[in-house]
Amino acid sequence: MPQHISSQALFTVAIIALIAWRMYARIRRTIGRQRLSAVRPWLTLAIFPLLIALLALATRSLPLAEASLACGVAIGIGLGGLGLRLTRFEASADGVYYTPSAHLGVLLSTLLLARIAYRFLVGGLPGSTVGAPPPSASALTPLTLLLVSTLAGYYCVYAIGLLRWAARSRGEVAT
């Protein structure tokens, strides 16, 4: 048994720890009352449309991948609208708060976690094969694109809804 730990094993452990930490933070953020951040919705509206545009560019010659991307965005838009209807909004003198639907947030987080786990099980852990080439464009499977674009559509619609509600509620609290 070797005395030292390989850099690939450390990389794999670091990736798993990062994913576990982000999933914990994500699930925790989807449950319970939250203060509306002034920056987070704007970052969402900057990053996710860019991600979708880059994925659309990468899959422009693959009709099934393009269809998955478009269907995912459409599903995400619908879920975003549903999420906004299920969200409780509160405006008070000390700030603007919202409580997202725990069921919808946990469902979306679980789908993402299941897809990440599946990709690790099928493709192996990062660094598990020495000298392996980087993932090819085929790593963008239609199911992965569907899930990613669903999340992107959901978060964009949700961020727009939060910003619209915050603008209306700040005017009401001020008067």
Image (cartoon, rainbow, N blue to C red):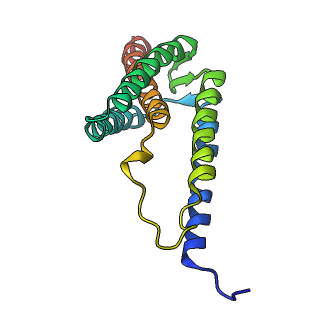
Q: Is residue 14 above or below residue 163?
A: below
Residue that appears at 61% across and 22% down: 104
Judging depth in this view, the residue of 164 and 158 nearest the camera is 158
Q: Residue 175 in the image: x percent, y percent?
A: 39, 10
Q: Residue 83 in the image: x percent, y percent?
A: 53, 17
Residue that appears at 58% across and 29% down: 108
Count of numbered circles in the view:
0
Tell me the quarter of the image containing the N terminus: bottom right
Q: Residue 161 in the image: x percent, y percent?
A: 41, 18
Residue 115 left/right relative to 160? right
Residue that appears at 43% across and 25% down: 72
Residue 60 left/right relative to 39? left
Image quadrant where residue 55 sits = top left
Q: Is residue 116 above or below residue 9?
A: above
Image quadrant where residue 158 sits = top left
Residue that appears at 37% across and 17% down: 164
The furthest residue to the right? 1
Q: Is residue 6 above or below residue 134?
A: below
